[in-house]
Image (cartoon, grey):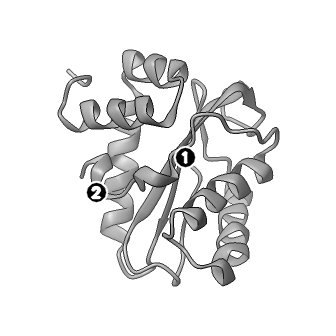
């Protein structure tokens, strides 16, 4: 699975303004709403579902990366977005570090395979130091989209 299969290009955000976990999740879900990928009446339910998932254990996986995700019946296919925070956000990460890179995923409950493949792809790409470094330095959404395309074309992972 590639980023192009699930990342909403219109929802990518290079300059997240949120400064706490819930605000980041809200800002990224709002980006998906603005991009027309989810409906307004489902926003709160999706946010609550992601926060409920966070209660099980932080999706801040370390090295400045978090992958907040949930399964939700309002979507009929896997969708996601990417956000970058220059300052970093305390996300209760496993390593205690602030998070700069966020990959938010929402998938239908009846498609667990897609959900797992997306998480696999994200974690594989994020193990690449160069990819993470370039993402953190991206100045705008277009640069992020270009990096995602390069990752899809195996230009990072050896």
Could you tell me which quadrant the C terminus lies in? top left
Q: How many marks?
A: 2
Q: Quadrant of residue 66?
A: top right
Which residue occupies 50% across, 23% down?
138
The residue lying toward the viewer, choosing from 135 and 11, is 11
Is 91 left or right of 1, judged from the image as shown?
right
Which residue occupies 49% across, 37% down?
141
Residue 6 in percent (x, y) is at 35, 58
Mark number for residue 5? 2
Q: Quadrant of residue 31?
A: bottom right
Residue 85 in percent (x, y) is at 66, 31
Residue highlighted by disc 1? 67
Q: Nearer the viewer, mark 1 or mark 2?
A: 2
Q: CA distance from mark 1 to mark 2?
A: 16 Å
Is 14 left or right of 7, judged from the image as shown?
right
Is 36 left or right of 6, judged from the image as shown?
right
Q: Earlier in the sequence, mark 1 or mark 2?
A: 2
Q: Secondary structure at mark 2?
A: helix
From what the image shows, is residue 83 above or below residue 115? above
Residue 73 in percent (x, y) is at 51, 84
Residue 72 in percent (x, y) is at 54, 77
Which residue occupies 59% across, 63% down?
34
Mark number for residue 76? none
Q: Secondary structure at mark 1?
A: loop
């Amino acid at each position: 699975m590639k980023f192009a299969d699930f990342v909403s290009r219109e929802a990518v955000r290079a300059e997240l303004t949120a400064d706490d976990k819930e605000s980041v999740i809200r800002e990224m879900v709002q980006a998906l709403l603005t991009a027309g990928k989810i409906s307004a009446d489902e926003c709160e339910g999706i946010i609550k579902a992601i926060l409920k998932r966070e209660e099980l254990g932080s999706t801040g996986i370390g090295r400045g990366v978090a992958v907040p995700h949930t399964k939700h019946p309002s979507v009929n296919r896997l969708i996601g977005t990417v956000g970058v925070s220059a300052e970093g956000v305390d996300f209760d990460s496993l390593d205690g570090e602030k998070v700069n890179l966020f990959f938010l995923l929402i998938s239908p409950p009846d498609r667990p395979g897609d959900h797992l493949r997306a998480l696999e792809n994200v974690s594989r790409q994020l193990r690449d130091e160069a990819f993470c470094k370039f993402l953190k330095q991206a100045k705008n959404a277009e640069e992020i989209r270009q990096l995602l395309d390069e990752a899809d074309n195996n230009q990072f992972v050896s």
